[in-house]
Image (cartoon, helix red, strand yellow):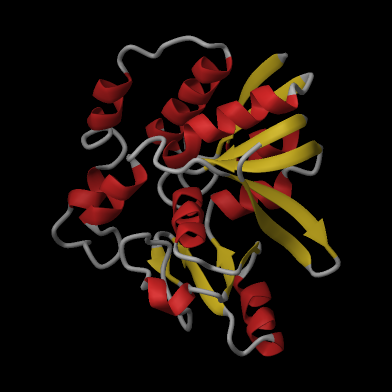
């Protein structure tokens, strides 16, 4: 099995084989929480315009997303796992757009299969890959808005790779905690808690919390997330 680590939007475009689009802060951590909250469907879209087009077709769908971290105007929730209200998303179709993660999905046109990745389901991602035994794996670190590398996504890719290769990452706990000062500082800015709540940081670094994988497939209406567990 050949494992390559790629970076940002450009990396998503290079990805081949079984591709993992990684966005720890916060897109794909959030999607795991949404599934755990009982959302009936998640559809990633690339633009705000596409999200509102879904609202025209389905008045009951929930719009979740951000640009530059801030909730899109007219949306129901921002890209924040700690502020989404479970009762509001349970049994609902979620339309999700972000500055990095969902754009990675859209740009991974050369992938044979796409799953999403975050620390909260990293071990499940690795186990799924070992189960599938693909010839090539692409781990794509989406970074900040798909344009600047982010330590949390790089760490997640390294951790997934170590699990696939049955190597113990001895300093994992230390490196995860260090994200507080190296990558996650914005969650502790008292003047920016409305956009980046401190609680989001802790929800996103709770590694191996979920035992399922989120697979991206496409139907006649666009991209759709499928929860896979067990495998």
Choose top left, top right, bottom left or bottom right for residue 19: top right
With respect to residue 222, does 102 lie above or below?
Answer: above
**Which residue, as the protein is rendered here, is positioned at the far front?**
230
Residue 225 in picture, x, y percent from top left: 66, 56
Residue 160 in picture, x, y percent from top left: 52, 25
Q: Is residue 194 left or right of residue 218?
A: left
Q: Is residue 111 left or right of residue 117?
A: right
With respect to residue 31, does 13 lie above or below?
Answer: above
With respect to residue 88, does 216 lie above or below?
Answer: above
Instruction: Please say whether residue 15 is visible from this viewpoint.
Output: no
With respect to residue 101, does 157 lie above or below?
Answer: above
- The total of numbered circles placed on residues is 0
Q: What residue is rendered at 33% in x and 12% in y?
A: 170
**Front in this rendered view, residue 176 or 68:** 176
Quarter of the image with the C terminus in it:
top right
Residue 66 in picture, x, y percent from top left: 46, 65
**Which residue, as the protein is rendered here, is positioned at the far right?**
220
Residue 149 in picture, x, y percent from top left: 47, 34
**Which residue, as the protein is rendered here, is positioned at the far left?**
190
Quarter of the image with the N terminus in it:
top right
Choose top left, top right, bottom left or bottom right for residue 136: top right
Q: Is residue 152 left or right of residue 224?
A: left
Q: What residue is rendered at 29% in x and 58% in y?
A: 196
Instruction: Please say whether residue 174 is visible from this viewpoint.
Output: yes
Q: Is residue 7 left or right of residue 170?
A: right
Q: What residue is rendered at 57% in x and 33% in y?
A: 125
């Amino acid at each position: 099995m050949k494992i390559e680590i790629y970076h940002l939007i450009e990396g998503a475009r290079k990805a081949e084989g079984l591709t993992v689009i990684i966005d720890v802060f916060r897109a794909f951590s959030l999607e795991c929480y949404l599934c755990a909250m009982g959302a009936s469907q998640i559809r990633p879209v690339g633009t705000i315009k596409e999200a509102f087009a879904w609202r025209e077709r389905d008045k009951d769908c929930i719009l979740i997303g951000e640009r530059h971290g801030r909730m899109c105007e007219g949306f129901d929730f921002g890209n924040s796992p700690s502020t989404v209200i479970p009762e509001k998303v349970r049994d609902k179709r979620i339309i999700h757009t972000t500055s990095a993660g969902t754009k990675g999905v859209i740009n991974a046109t050369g992938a044979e299969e796409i799953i999403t990745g975050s620390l909260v389901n990293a071990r499940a991602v690795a186990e799924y890959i070992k189960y599938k035994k693909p010839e090539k794996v692409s781990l794509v670190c989406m970074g900040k808005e798909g344009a600047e590398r982010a330590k949390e996504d790089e760490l997640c890719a390294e951790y997934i790779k170590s699990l696939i290769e049955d190597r113990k990452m001895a300093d994992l706990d230390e490196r995860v905690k260090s994200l507080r000062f190296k990558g996650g500082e914005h969650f502790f800015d008292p003047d920016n808690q409305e956009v980046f709540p401190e609680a989001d940081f802790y929800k996103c670094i709770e590694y191996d919390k979920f035992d399922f994988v989120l697979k991206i497939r496409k139907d006649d209406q666009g991209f759709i997330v499928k929860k896979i567990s067990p495998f």
